[in-house]
Amino acid sequence: MGRAGFCLKDFRRQIVGIDMKVPGKDRRRLKYINFDNAASTPALEPVVKRLQHHLKWYSGVHRGTGYKSLVSTHEYNRSREVIADFVQADLDHDAVIFLKNTTEAINKLSYRIGFKPGDQVLVSGMEHHSNDLPWRSRVRVNYAGLDEKGRLDLSDLEEKLKRGYPRTRLVGICGASNVTGHINDIHHIAALAHEYRAQVLVDGAQLVPHHPIDMKPIFHPGHIDFLAFSGHKIYAPYGCGVLIGPRDTFEQGIPEYAGGGTIRAVHSDAVYWADPPEKEEAGSPNVLGVVGLADTLSYLKKVGVGQMSEYEASLTEYTLNRMSEVRGLSVYGDGPRVAVISFNLAGVPHSLVGAILCYEAGIGLRTGCFCAQPYVRYLMGEREQFFECLKSGGNCKEPMPGMVRISLAAYNTRAEIDHLVEWLKRISGNRQEFIRRYRYDDLNDEYLPRDYDVAMLSSRLGKSLY
Ligand SMILES: Cc1ncc(COP(=O)(O)O)c(C=O)c1O
């Protein structure tokens, strides 16, 4: 690994919990396969070990003078450099702000842009709710259209920029979709946005974990003004998210959270704010989450992000080819994508497919709308009735429409994909048999094996330490 490049076996060995077995239906022990990396990725052993070491030195940051506090503060501040380097941000121009996750990062930006009456934001019809809802309550939101496969329609985006000029302040676009995995040409979109004097925010939650990313120098037409992403989707434990963007955006105005750490001086009748990023990080920060993210990114850089990305691309292609062997299976989307694949199996509800794979094949994945209901609805079209029923306040007893999603990472293998495909074929060939073996729990909107002891789930984490 390292200088020799990405080695699947070595990388896989570093994944915490990679060889675990889980209880399945009929008390069988199943080898666990994680295909839910778009939700959260497992942590890396060397990072966890280093964090255990860091815990010995762990102390409050910024305001302490003890040696441990100095060490912690140094590590915390150094993390900004590591993270900026990973995405090629320019620390002379940008602030790296630590938050909980992408959702918090985009919400923060929505407060800090300083919208004036009449301003608009342009997002796309393929966004996660986290890059849609934060804008709705602050400013008028327009949506760039999609083509029939759910890909971004760039000419519609440009048309809307043209019509929205000069009121469109920001274009907010996902680097990659969490539903179809479609990759957007972020630099082209940034160049378009800049032509119409708008800034660009890239929601990097699904792109940064799967692709090398370069925000590019500020004089470059395709420069990314703002980037948000989540540590928990890129192997970093303990939850830390990042918002990167021009310092001057955050120098103006009052932060949406104020308090300890955000100020230079406070008088009874005046507040002098600290410079960003401190101004934007109210209260005691999540030091371990930040250091864990920086360590993870350093480790991934050593492994080779480009090579990991190439491996994921070949695994995705292999998966799509193998899935095409399954009768009645339709995949959503088409074209360049990260390792995210959503599909449905004709005649079997999405959440039943998920339950069978969970309880009988040991596979972890996600079903439903993946916090992107407008997009899923666009792609599915025909289930519009359900949403109409909800809109009119109806109580829809049938399962929520949705899809099955697998999301792969660089430690997943072809053998795991083969196992999935074998099970999908089994389900497709024995629909009625599987449907009989499960019951629908409409309270939790999920399927359960008729004989499954749910209480067993709560005893899985082992005995309490206390
Ligand atoms: C594209 C995209 N944006 C934003 C988010 C929100 O990320 P978080 O839950 O870490 O805030 C997600 C989460 O799945 C996502 O996939």
Image (cartoon, rainbow, N blue to C red):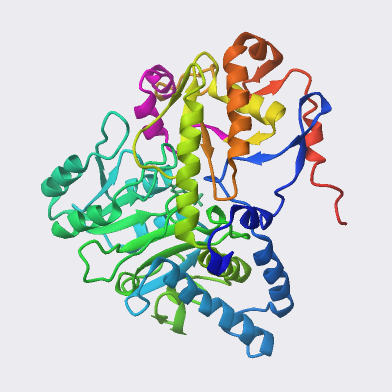
- Coordinates of residue 300 in the picture (x, y in percent): 54, 63
**Vertical arrangement, residue 396 with respect to residue 333, above or below:** above
Name the residue nearer the viewer: 348 or 313: 313
Left or right: 158 in relation to 436:
left
Left or right: 74 in relation to 169:
right
Name the residue nearer the viewer: 429 or 103: 429
User: Is residue 267 visible to us here?
Assistant: no
Name the residue nearer the viewer: 375 or 258: 375
- Image quarter of the C terminus: bottom right
**Vertical arrangement, residue 11 with respect to residue 244, above or below:** above
Where on the picture, by quarter, is residue 146? Answer: top left
**Vertical arrangement, residue 119 with respect to residue 381, above or below:** below
Left or right: 416 in relation to 373:
right
- Give the residue displayed 45% in from the left and 80% down from the top: 263
Outermost front residue: 4
Left or right: 104 in relation to 388:
right
Q: Main secondary structure of the magenta part?
A: helix
- Coordinates of residue 325 in the picture (x, y in percent): 50, 22
User: Is residue 90 visible to us here?
Assistant: yes
- Give the residue displayed 46% in from the left and 53% down from the top: 309
**Vertical arrangement, residue 164 with respect to residue 11, above or below:** above
Residue 387 sits inside the magenta stretch: yes
Residue 194 sits inside the magenta stretch: no
Q: How many marks?
A: 0
Name the residue nearer the viewer: 378 or 433: 433
- Image quarter of the N terminus: bottom right
Where on the picture, by quarter, is residue 421? Answer: top right
- Coordinates of residue 269 in the picture (x, y in percent): 41, 81
- Give the residue displayed 36% in from the left and 28% down from the top: 379
Residue stretch rendered in magenta on the structure: 366-390
- Give the residue displayed 32% in from the left and 49% down from the top: 173
- Coordinates of residue 96 in the picture (x, y in percent): 43, 71
